[in-house]
Image (tube, rainbow, N blue to C red):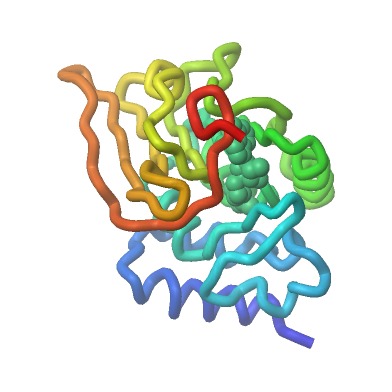
Amino acid sequence: MVNFKKARERMVETQIAARGIHDEGVFEAMRKVPRHLFVDEALRDQAYSDHPLPIAEKQTISQPYIVALMTESLELNGAEKVLEIGTGSGYQSAILAELADRVFSIERHPDLAYRANSILRKLGYQNIIVRVGDGSLGWPDDAPFDGIIVTAGTPKIPQPLIDQLNMGGRLVVPVGDRFGQDLILVRRLAEGIKKTNLGGVRFVNLVGKWGWKE
Ligand code: SAH
């Protein structure tokens, strides 16, 4: 039987702090959220390993380091309204909910949305709303957002997401082809849009109007 709490501490130390993440809030969130409950029972012992894991519908829960890197890049201080595209397992939503005020998360597969929602409820999160739909269109009803995180790869940055970013807000999105992407951080500033490349990543496809066709 794995000691999950110890496994989380070791994960933060060896995979996250050791690779240059500094945000103490991110460390705390990742020490707290029980990642093993977001994967299939058969994969629980691998939940804190240094790689992504399969979830239903041929999707994946991201590698812990990538979750940390993307979360840190949003520079959350507790007051933000955050939009997540690609709820998947719900793990990233939980990490965001620890660090922001409110999280809106969209998933295109209803069964994934349903499962993620039920585990998030079980864990007591009350500041996350999960919805089924095409997240490449954003969530216009509740826009603008202080942070937007896209956890699926897209050929180009969906324009609605840039439009739904608050002034001073940050958007992190993997942009590239179907097999590899660059993680792009977009900041909306008074003088315009500023983009920074955070490095190479590999995500499942964003499927939707502003992403890939099925
Ligand atoms: N953040 C997730 C990662 C899930 S993988 C986690 O922590 O587990 C990416 C997810 O994006 C998949 O579940 C996939 O179904 C979903 N997805 C792909 N295109 C989408 C779209 N246009 N709108 C909403 N979700 C989408």
Q: Position of residue 103 (x, y in %)?
A: 60, 34
Residue 214 occupies quadrant: top right
- Give the quarter of the figure containing the N terminus: bottom right
Q: Position of residue 146 (x, y in %)?
A: 43, 28
Residue 66 seen? yes
Seen in the picture, residue 97 relative to 40 is either above or below; the reply is above
Seen in the picture, residue 204 relative to 210 is either above or below; the reply is below
Q: Position of residue 176 (x, y in %)?
A: 37, 44
Q: Position of residue 59 (x, y in %)?
A: 66, 53
Seen in the picture, residue 53 relative to 179 is either above or below; the reply is below
Q: Nearer the viewer, residue 162 or 165?
A: 162
Q: Nearer the viewer, residue 164 or 124?
A: 164
Residue 186 occupies quadrant: top left
Looking at this view, name the residue that lies furthest to the left: 191
Residue 102 seen? no
**Residue found at x 71% / y 33%:** 130
Looking at this view, name the residue that lies furthest to the front: 214
**How many numbered dots are placed on residues in this image?**
0
Judge left or right: residue 25 versus residue 37: left
Looking at this view, name the residue that lies furthest to the bottom: 1
Residue 128 occupies quadrant: top right
**Residue found at x 58% / y 35%:** 207
Quarter holding ligand 1: top right
**Residue found at x 67% / y 77%:** 46
**Residue found at x 70% / y 51%:** 89
